[in-house]
Every structure is written in structure tokens, then in C-alpha cells.
Amino acid sequence: MYTIESSLKADLSIDLKQMYSLYKIEKPRLIFLPNPNNPTGTYVGENELVEFLEKMRSETEVKIVIDEAYNEYVRADDYANSMDLFAQYQNVVVMRTFSKIFGLAGLRVGTLIADENTIDYVNRVRNPFNVNSLAQEAAIAILGDTEYVKKAQQVNWQGLDFFYEKLGEMGVEYIPSQTNFVLFDCQQPAQPIFEKLLQLGVIVRPVAGYGLPNHLRMSVGLMPENEAAIEALKRVL
């Protein structure tokens, strides 16, 4: 068993045309499509995604797993409704998590939306009682708290817009994001900047392991935290 990596476009979005070309050569059994993508924050629009799925419609031996961990943060108008895609394409599987906007990361609970046959195979290999009863109750409760989700979205979008404004003023290039973080280009090796920020009490994420040695990923917090992060970044840069 091995993985096949598909490179990104110049704007760091997923290249579905290249992914399809690789599929035709390698014929993998699973295709993982993070939408939005981590750590870039980019996404695949509905038209492009549907075009890809149409090409894959007859490929019944492969499962296309759409990872939507950041689904609730998306503001793009052309973001696809994965539930509609799941209903239309037999080889589509959707994964979501309660660890992001719902704030239940410590409970390790998520959602798999798939056909009965796929779920049967997953149940054969997953650990018994892998999601405890308290985590399940918390997940059910948070799904009913729509006001909390709306407030969390507004806090996140306000924070992202603040980052965009301040990074722009500093002349720092960034990737517009559909998630709760922004990826920016330091125009120099990012590891020393990460370490200096750490000394100032600000933790960001180096992404050299993703082939982006000059970039850092910065998550949105509450506004005082966002302001502190930007001030620290100004000092370091």
C-alpha cells in the first residue's frame, strides 16, 4: 500500500485535472479530497468538483472521500453542497468533524456519510466504543445550537478580515481562506520567524513539511488574540 501525491496549482488550490490524470495511470482505490484544504485554506468550487465527479462517475471501484473538516467556515458562494453530491454519485463519501467550529476537539468525534456497504467495512475495522457516550451526547447537543455556530462563524470571519487588512498593510502576501486560519508568505525561511513568535507567546504553525518552507499558518482567535498575534508579527518581521 502506498500513497500518490497530487501537486497544487500556482494559487495553492487543488488541481483536479492533475488528480484525474494520476488516477487514470495509478488506479488507486481511494481518493482523498480535502475541501477546504489544509494548510492552504483554498477550496474547489462546485463546477470544477462536479466536472471531476462526472469523469469519475463510472469508476465504481474507487471511493472519493471529501474531507469537509472546515465546511462550516466557508463563505464562498460557489461551494458545493456535499449532501447533494453524495446523493448523485455512488462513489462519494463525506467526512466531517466536531473538532473545528463546534469546539469539541477533545472528544474526538466526527461524522462519516457513506453508503451502507462502505460503512459496513468501516465498522469491521474501527475500535469498539471508539466514540464514548458523553461525546455522542455533546455532539447531538451542539448540532441543535445553531446560534452558537452562527456566532462562531462571525467571530472567525471578522478575524480573517482583520488578518487580511493587517497583513496587506504590512506587505505580506497571504492566501484568501475558507477556513479558520490564513496561510502567509514570509519571503524567507519561516522556521526562525516561528521561533521568534514563540518567544513572544504567539504560536503559529510552520508548514515546511507540506513543501512550503517560507510560509506560516496562523489561526483566528478572539480579537485581542488576533491583535496580539499581528503586533508580534510586526516586531519579528
Image (tube, rainbow, N blue to C red):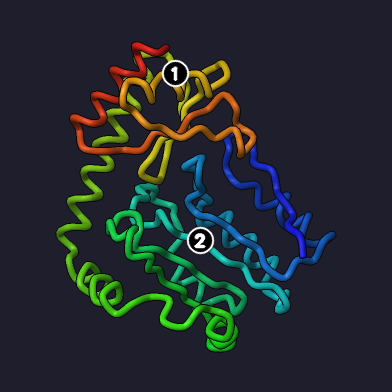
Q: Position of residue 177 (x, y in %)?
A: 42, 39
State whether residue 227 is above or below residue 55.
Answer: above
- Residue 218 found in image quarter: top left
Quarter of the image containing the N terminus? bottom right
Q: Residue 61: horizontal and vertical position, in percent?
A: 73, 77
- Residue ID at (46%, 72%): 84
Q: Quadrant of the C terminus?
A: top left
Give the residue type at disc 2. Answer: Asp
- Residue displayed at 27% across by 35% down: 159
**How dense is the environment of label 1, judged by Cα within 10 Å: few (below 14), some, or many (20 and up)?**
some
Residue on which disc 1 sits:
172
The residue identified by callout 2 is 67
Q: Position of residue 86 (x, y in %)?
A: 51, 74
Closer to the camera in the image, 230 or 196: 196
SS state under label 2: strand
Q: Tell me how far mark 1 sits from mark 2, CA to CA.
A: 29 Å
Q: Is residue 137 left or right of residue 189?
A: left
In the rendered view, tell whether residue 144 sits above or below residue 222.
Answer: below
Badge 1 or badge 2: first in the primary sequence: 2
